[in-house]
Amino acid sequence: MPLFVVPTPIGNLEDITLRAINVLRKVDVIACEDTRKTAILLQRYHIHVPTVSYYAHNEQRRTEQLIERLRRGEKVALVSDAGTPGISDPGSVLIQAAISEGFEIDILPGATAFVPALIHSGFETHPFTFYGFLPDKKGERREILQSLQFHPFPLIFYLSPHKAQKHMADMLDILGNRRAALVREISKIYQEARRANLDAILSQAEAEGVRGELVLVVDKPLQQVLDDGQWKKEAEQMVTNGISQKEVVKFIIQRYPVAKNAVKDWLIQVRQKIDR
């Protein structure tokens, strides 16, 4: 028997396929991230199948149990609280184990949050890069953002409401003041898309707070920033004209989607060249 990987609605419970409902009805067990949340979906569609929890802290142990059930010929379905299992949710360990054991994987198409968020942004949709959740540790998070600083495609991140402000502050500092779209509560009553530069989105979040499921789409850097030429020439000219470093940095990051640290590093080089 295959392992069925079944996407579930990311908000509106009607966003589920007929096939997904039929699969969930015919399996022997459903492995779910939170049995209480999945119970709401199952109750809505009158699905009476046993569930077991499958989340980050028990996935190794639970994977062994579920693989054993597959060996016995049982039909197993894997779901997450919302969206497609394995996309920033538990699931990849079980899927990899099932593949290693030679079981077929039947992955149903369905809901995921980052695709509608990208469409909501209004940015170019091809190509793009989906990252998901950034690390909680600041050093690790900033290192990843630095590696993405000149990445030439739109970037898509998942954000937790209580961490969103500090994560966006790091993005503004490292990626620069780019266009962005903060999309929240997709397919729910309070669905919203805030489209502005990163600094404006961050300021609004600091003033009003943010709630719900959040997806942040950050546009690609402008070509002139990728080429590094225009803003560097302008910054160097301003320093030559006697404008203070603080004012130069402020002007450049407002005019171009370039990171503050990148401007500061360049001004050090300019100052060294002038002082020779």
Image: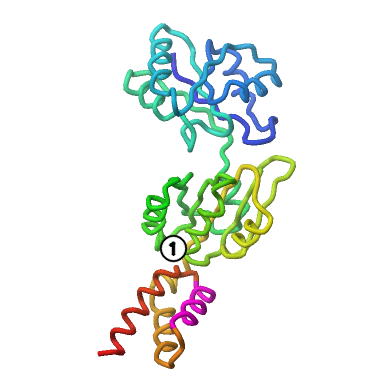
Residue at 33%, 83% in the rendered image: 270
Of residue 258 and residue 202, the one placed in the foreground of this image is 202
- Residue 248 magenta-highlighted: yes
Q: Is residue 228 left or right of residue 128?
A: left
- Residue 275 magenta-highlighted: no
Residue 191: image location, x then y, percent? 70, 46
Residue 20: image location, x then y, percent? 59, 24
Q: Is residue 102 left or right of residue 134?
A: left
Q: Quadrant of the C terminus?
A: bottom left
Q: Amino acid at mark 1?
A: Ile
Residue 16 higher or lower than 114, as above or below = above
Residue at 56%, 62% in the rendered image: 198
Of residue 138 and residue 59, the one placed in the foreground of this image is 138
Residue 122 higher or lower than 73, as above or below = below
Magenta-highlighted stretch: main secondary structure? helix
Residue 237: image location, x then y, percent? 42, 89
Q: Disc 1 marks which residue?
A: 174
Q: Is residue 178 left or right of residue 59?
A: right
Residue farthest to the right, as pictured: 189
Residue farthest to the bottom, as pictured: 241
Residue 192 higher or lower than 39, as above or below = below
Residue at 51%, 77% in the rendered image: 250
Residue farthest to the top, as pictured: 72
Q: Quadrant of the N terminus?
A: top left
- Quarter location, residue 96: top left
Q: What range is drawn magenta here?
A: 245-256
- Quarter location, residue 259: bottom left
